[in-house]
């Protein structure tokens, strides 16, 4: 050590039995090739990788088999040469025991490497110190390196520090969890790679110093690192710092606090303090990637616990099934069998041993029940505060527990639930043996889910509103178009009017038998507009006369003239109307039955529009009644009239329908769709009734108090059904 | 006499002080309110399913603001009723069964794509535009946008839309709250610990 | 085969609630011994009676609630409640007072609220307050005046038994009377401090026996602290607050009870180390504990000096129990990564 580092202490923490001797007394062994390797596409935090091989492909050791998907992701490489035997969903090592897509490789036993070389050679540089940092980061990304301490965050992403100026690199060699010795053994046997990795990281980050924090229970590792420092001539930049043994000193936040006294802001990242923290295993992997071009295809994993005879560390290919490693270590399944991936404090118990080793698997712990007894049934919290004393994040675990249990998530959040690092120290000391961490995980998950749901609801609201807006706009556009069309039509008509009458005349002659023709109509209309113009003029004159006393004597004359012209207009209007009717009737009489005003469709439409009008009339009446307006009476009679009209229309429709179906088989096809639709509706309705009945039955059986409401609903449905049935029978198509 | 005056003065003084305090508090702690309708609408699940009898969540929110019952939204279920009750300061009521039951798992629509005839009926029905497709083309539900409102199921002429439970993957999965000690002992402890987590 | 999957951590430290409660019970033993030495077998008999009643009531309620009886009896909390009540009640209190107080404490103050861990108030003190309010005479006059003072032997085992169970008051009158705190408070207006201290109840410097009883509880409390079962916050802040009040407000021994009597008489040490520290109903944050303890100290002094009751541990503790959740919400520690501690309960609270 060259510099004196002022150590700080973090609050809380515990001293569980270390149990590291069992596994760190013999060198790392190389695990043999298993029968198949299973590589989950999602071994890191972020998006799962995207397979670039197909089933049946042959791959070489170190060949890319899946590419990263997006920025926060990492590629995957074949750990050995062989054939892709499957790409399918398999159970993955995760507490949930869920399945995700995995690439399965059947090794050919040759271990043929794909072509690879160090970055320096690949770039053809003379001085390896000159490699630009972008190239380094790119290499780290291409080699699929993700945090090997347990979290599995893609390393390259962590090295994109953006605008933060990094002055300190911290390598985490604390390994505070009991039982695990993977980092310990790595530092002993690969100290040189660790230091080389630190050099590369320093180069990338432009940091001035690097602190390697190692707990004082690993003297051999510390000595090895010191030697390697001297070898690499790096004593001035890199310090190996011995820190006191206390769980969880290996937590990133805690280690930063110990070494620098600074706290990572809640919700922030260490980079905002000018610090980047990496695991020593990651550093070694980086050295391999940059200097040798070897992607991350294997790692060092501790296999320990009393259920295995041969405890120790293995260098194991990613994807190796846990059962393979266990059998190499002489595993004897114990009573109440448990296999934990990770350490006893933060690891998770595997649902089966068939799951593969992944990038984050630092330990496999197979304890006997005697060694690590499962908790007794939890008692109530006595608020002893031992958990608060142990919490390294200075939370109040007892309060968090209380709120989580009561599902008062907002209070839990207010008590900084999300600053909990799930270290398990609180559970460890809790005298009531409450699975506190599980409660926190539950709360966090539920809060996250709630947030996601809220976000989704917000999204749905926005989309819904956008849709409504769009629909309205479309309607408005349609309206505008319709208007435009109507205008155009009107213009066309007036243009027609100016067209020579002679053109219309032959037409008039040809249909001489008809009382009125288009030409006549036009004439009448012309007269009408002339008369209207005259009226307007007379009115003007009349007005002027009234205002001007001198012209007073002319008023009666004007008035009589006015009434005359108005009378004329009236008769004209009448004539025009009659002409129009006739004109309409003419083609209708001769045209195909499509225009038949008595066809069932038409009648139905009529009926429908009448009914709609009735509805609006009723509504108006209601409004008027509510407001006590004096139009009530008028509206009432209006409604009555409308009612009779609807009845009429209906009767007409039904009669037409009957006659149609009775007399004209062609008409039946026209009504058929209606009948079919009704039938469909009827069936659906029956379905609904069935469902409602079932629900009611269930409610009755369980004596729920919703019985009444359900009964009501059922009755309603039955009514509807009856209505449908009646309707279908009238169409005569049942 | 003087005691009365003193008493009155003291009371007046107190009144003034508390008045000032209240005034200050009302200014200092003023709630910047968005109107009740929006607050209510924010609590509704925005499924837009219409099960409440209104054409969408917003209309129901408006109705609630006008005094409509708060227990008519099945997708929201008990939690929404509770939240509404908290917001409006009324007693929560159990969900009105007439409008349907709360589903235990969130659902999403799934279109069996080879059966889809491309009639676009479901697109017209979906209140949140969660279905993609064009006339005579196969249609697909955008799972992330689907609110599971069921509205697209009925219009489909070939019945190729199913409601399936929303799937969990490793990133959305989370631990459930542990069974308490009492519950554990109530049954055989060992079988519970193994079963519940197997 | 499916393996056992439980949430981490997969290991557990040596702490156990039942063991903690047992240690608390053990720590009361010196006090119990000294009380028995000075006040006769009455204390012991009542304590045993209280413990038996507590366990029985607990078992009964658990049975009624269909809870596993042995599992919950083994947590030893009922044992501690019974013990504390037995120690707090007057040594020669009639049996029905003990039974009433204890069963009320267990059934109403503890189980009705949901059992261990869910009671907002200290059950022992609820039981105590109930009988103190209901039967003030029996509760204030059944204290034994020590044998050194009266010159007579303290009540022997059979005598104590008969006083407690048959209530033969003729036998009792020879041994019983008010506590020193009670006497000082009521007589100081008539006599000077020096005259008072010459009385039988006060054996010269202090009173016969009470100082030893309190010292024994202090020792038990220090043992608990050494075992890290309680922290220093509550006892220290409570005793300091009591002392400060006494020194500032009651420095005149001819008008007020002196500090020495406050600290070493009555239930002061029992209260400070065993009752106020009952974790379930106390405040649980470090700062909160200080406030909570100080509150008890101040209330204790106020009620002792100006209230109707000679001793006030029960009321002081119960009053502060009310405040504990509030204190907790507003004394959260500053968590890692936060520049300021949070206050209150709602996310909006700062
Ligand atoms: S350690 Fe356990 S019993 Fe004690 S306060 Fe924390 S959660 Fe409660
Ligand atoms: S698990 Fe969370 S609450 Fe418990 S000690 Fe660790 S950080 Fe604190
Ligand atoms: S029932 Fe449907 S439409 Fe009505 S508020 Fe609830 S989610 Fe919205
Ligand atoms: S896809 Fe179907 S279920 Fe999903 S939101 Fe749209 S209409 Fe509702």
Image (spheres, coloured by chain):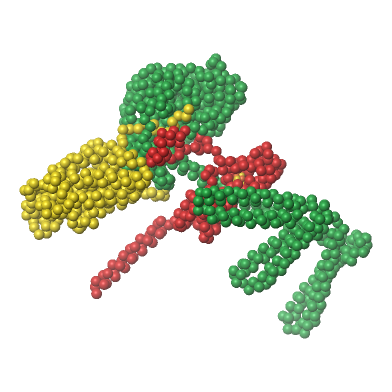
Chain colours: A green, B red, C yellow
Q: Is residue A77 left or right of residue C163?
A: right
Name the residue nearer the viewer: A517 or C15. Answer: C15
Give the vertical position of A162 relative to B17 (above or below).
above
Q: Residue at x 46, y 43 (%)?
A: A447
Question: Quadrant of residue A196 in the image?
Answer: top left
Which residue is at 91% across, 61% downward? A511
Residue at position x 46%, y 18% in the image: A31
**x and y percent of residue A50 in the render?**
57, 30
* C43 vs B173, nearest the viewer: C43
Q: Nearer the viewer, residue A399 or A170?
A: A399
Answer above or below: position of A1 versus A531. Answer: above
Instruction: Kindly tell me whether residue B25 is visible in this rendering.
Output: yes
The image shows residue C53, relative to residue A213, as above or below, that is below
Q: Is residue A395 visible?
A: no
- Where residue A186 sits, quadrant-wise, is top left
**Residue furthest out toward the top:** A110
Q: Is residue B76 left or right of residue C55?
A: right
Report the side of A79 relative to C126 (left or right). Answer: right
Q: Nearer the viewer, residue B43 or A477?
A: B43
Residue A572 as seen in the image, left or right of residue A46: right
Q: Where is residue A324 drawn, in percent x and y?
A: 48, 21
Indicate the position of residue A244 as horizontal and vertical percent values: 31, 28
Above or below, comparing residue A93 to residue B101 in the picture: above
Residue A135 spot, x, y in % from top left = 52, 26
């Amino acid at each position: 050590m060259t510099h004196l580092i002022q150590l700080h202490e973090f609050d809380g923490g515990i001293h569980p039995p270390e149990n590291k001797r069992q596994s760190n007394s013999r060198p790392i062994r190389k695990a043999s090739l298993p029968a198949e390797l299973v590589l989950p596409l999602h071994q890191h935090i972020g998006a799962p990788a995207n397979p670039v091989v197909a089933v049946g492909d042959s791959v070489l050791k170190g060949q890319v088999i899946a590419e990263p998907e997006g920025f926060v992701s990492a590629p995957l490489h074949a750990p050995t040469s062989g054939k892709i035997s499957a790409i399918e969903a398999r159970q993955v090592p995760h507490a949930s025991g869920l399945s995700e897509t995995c690439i399965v490789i059947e090794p050919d036993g040759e271990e043929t490497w794909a072509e690879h070389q160090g970055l320096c050679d690949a770039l053809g540089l003379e001085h390896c110190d000159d490699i630009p940092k972008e190239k380094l980061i790119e290499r780290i990304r291409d080699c699929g390196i993700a945090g090997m301490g347990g979290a599995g965050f893609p390393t390259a992403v962590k090295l994109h520090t953006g605008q933060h100026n990094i002055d300190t690199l911290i390598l985490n060699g604390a390994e505070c969890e009991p039982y695990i010795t993977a980092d310990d053994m790595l530092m002993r046997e690969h100290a040189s790679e660790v230091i080389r990795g630190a050099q590369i990281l320093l180069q990338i980050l432009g940091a001035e110093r690097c602190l390697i924090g190692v707990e004082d229970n690993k003297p051999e590792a510390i000595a090895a690192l010191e030697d390697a420092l001297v070898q690499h001539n790096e004593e001035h930049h890199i310090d190996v710092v011995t820190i006191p043994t206390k769980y969880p000193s290996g937590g990133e936040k805690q280690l930063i606090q110990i070494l620098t006294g600074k706290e990572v802001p809640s919700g922030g990242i260490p980079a905002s303090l000018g610090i980047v923290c990496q695991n020593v295993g990651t550093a070694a992997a980086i050295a391999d990637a940059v200097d040798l071009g070897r992607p991350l295809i294997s790692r060092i994993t501790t296999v320990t616990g009393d259920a295995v005879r041969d405890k120790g560390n293995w260098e194991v290919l990613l994807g190796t099934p846990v059962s393979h490693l266990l059998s190499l270590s002489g595993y004897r399944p114990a009573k109440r069998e448990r296999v934990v991936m990770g350490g006893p404090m933060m690891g998770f118990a595997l649902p089966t041993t068939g799951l593969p080793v992944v990038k984050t698997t630092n330990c496999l712990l197979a304890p006997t029940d005697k060694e690590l007894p499962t908790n007794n049934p939890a008692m109530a919290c006595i608020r002893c505060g031992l958990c608060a004393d142990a919490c390294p994040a200075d939370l109040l675990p007892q309060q968090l527990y209380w709120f989580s249990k009561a599902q008062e998530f907002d209070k839990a959040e207010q008590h900084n639930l999300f600053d909990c690092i799930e270290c398990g120290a609180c559970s460890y000391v809790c005298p009531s043996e409450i699975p506190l961490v599980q409660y926190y995980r539950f709360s966090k998950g539920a809060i996250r889910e709630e947030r996601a749901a809220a976000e989704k609801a917000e999204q749905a609201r926005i989309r819904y509103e956008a849709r409504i807006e769009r629909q309205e706009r479309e309607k408005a556009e349609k309206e505008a178009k319709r208007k435009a069309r109507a205008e155009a039509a009107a213009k066309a008509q007036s243009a027609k009017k100016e067209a020579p009458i002679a053109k219309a005349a032959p037409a008039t002659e040809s249909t001489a038998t008809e009382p009125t023709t288009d030409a006549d109509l036009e004439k009448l209309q012309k007269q009408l507009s002339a008369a209207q113009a005259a009226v307007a003029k007379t009115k003007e004159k009349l007005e002027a006369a009234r205002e001007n006393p001198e012209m007073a004597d002319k008023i009666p004359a004007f008035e009589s003239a006015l009434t005359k012209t108005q009378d004329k207009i009236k008769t004209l209007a009448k004539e025009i109307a009659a002409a129009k009717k006739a004109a309409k009737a003419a083609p209708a009489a001769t045209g195909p039955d499509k225009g038949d005003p008595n066809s069932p469709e038409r009648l139905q439409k009529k009926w429908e529009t009448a009914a709609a009008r009735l509805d609006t009339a009723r509504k108006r009446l209601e409004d008027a009644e509510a407001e006590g307006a004096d139009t009530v009476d008028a509206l009432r009679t209006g409604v009555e009239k409308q009612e009779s009209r609807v009845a009429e229309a209906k009767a007409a429709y039904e009669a037409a329908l009957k006659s149609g179906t009775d007399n004209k088989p062609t008409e039946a096809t026209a009504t058929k769709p209606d009948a079919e639709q009704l039938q469909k509706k009827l069936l659906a309705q029956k379905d609904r009734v069935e469902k409602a009945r079932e629900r009611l039955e269930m409610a009755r059986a369980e004596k729920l108090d919703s019985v009444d409401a359900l009964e009501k609903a059922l009755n309603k449905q039955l009514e509807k059904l009856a209505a449908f049935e009646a309707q279908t029978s009238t169409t005569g198509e049942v | 006499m003087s005691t009365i005056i003193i008493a009155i003065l003291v009371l007046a003084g107190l009144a003034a002080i508390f008045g000032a305090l209240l005034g200050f508090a009302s200014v200092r702690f003023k709630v910047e309110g968005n109107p009740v309708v929006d607050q209510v609408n924010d609590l509704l699940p925005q499924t837009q399913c219409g099960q409440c009898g209104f054409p969408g969540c917003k209309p129901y929110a408006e109705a609630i603001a006008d005094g409509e019952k708060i227990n008519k939204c099945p997708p929201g279920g008990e939690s929404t009723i509770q939240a509404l009750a908290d917001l409006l300061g009324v007693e929560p009521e159990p969900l009105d069964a007439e409008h349907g039951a709360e589903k235990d798992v969130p659902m999403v629509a799934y279109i069996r794509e080879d059966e889809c005839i491309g009639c676009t009926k479901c697109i017209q029905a979906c209140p949140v535009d969660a279905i993609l497709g064009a006339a005579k083309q196969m249609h697909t539900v955008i799972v992330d946008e689907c609110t599971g409102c069921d509205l697209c199921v009925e219009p489909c002429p070939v019945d190729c839309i199913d409601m399936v439970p929303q799937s969990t993957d490793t990133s959305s999965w989370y631990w459930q709250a542990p069974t308490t000690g009492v519950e554990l002992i109530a049954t055989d402890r060992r079988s519970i610990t193994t079963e519940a987590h197997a | 085969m499916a393996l056992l999957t439980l949430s981490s951590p997969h290991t557990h430290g040596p702490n156990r609630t039942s063991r903690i409660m047992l240690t608390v019970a053990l720590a009361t033993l010196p006090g119990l011994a000294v009380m028995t030495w000075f006040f006769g077998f009455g204390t012991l008999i009542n304590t045993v009676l209280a413990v038996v009643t507590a366990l029985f009531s607990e078992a009964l309620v658990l049975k009624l609630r269909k809870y596993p009886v042995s599992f919950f009896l083994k947590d030893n909390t009922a044992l501690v409640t019974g013990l504390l009540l037995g120690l707090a009640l007057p040594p020669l209190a009639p049996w029905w007072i003990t039974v009433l107080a204890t069963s009320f404490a267990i059934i109403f103050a503890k189980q009705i609220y949901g059992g261990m861990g869910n009671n907002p108030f200290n059950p022992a003190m609820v039981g105590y307050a109930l009988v103190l309010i209901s039967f003030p005479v029996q509760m204030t006059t059944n204290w034994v005046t020590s044998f050194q003072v009266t010159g007579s032997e303290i009540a022997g085992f059979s005598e104590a038994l008969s006083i407690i169970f048959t209530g033969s008051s003729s036998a009792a009158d020879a041994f019983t009377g008010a506590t020193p705190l009670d006497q000082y408070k009521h007589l100081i207006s008539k006599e000077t401090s020096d005259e008072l201290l010459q009385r039988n109840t006060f054996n010269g410097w202090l009173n016969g026996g009470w100082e030893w009883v309190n010292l024994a509880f202090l020792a038990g409390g220090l043992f608990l602290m050494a075992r890290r079962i309680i922290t220093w916050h509550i006892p220290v802040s409570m005793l300091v607050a009591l002392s400060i009040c006494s020194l500032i407000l009651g420095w005149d021994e001819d008008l007020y009870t002196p500090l020495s009597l406050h600290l070493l008489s009555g239930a002061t040490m029992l209260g400070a180390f065993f009752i106020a520290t009952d974790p379930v109903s106390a405040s649980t944050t470090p700062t909160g504990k200080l406030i909570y303890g100080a509150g008890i100290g101040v209330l204790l002094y106020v009620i002792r000096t100006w209230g109707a009751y000679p001793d006030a541990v029960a009321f002081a503790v119960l009053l502060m129990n009310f405040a504990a959740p509030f204190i907790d919400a507003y004394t959260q520690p500053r968590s890692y990564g936060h520049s300021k501690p949070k206050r209150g309960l709602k996310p909006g609270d700062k």
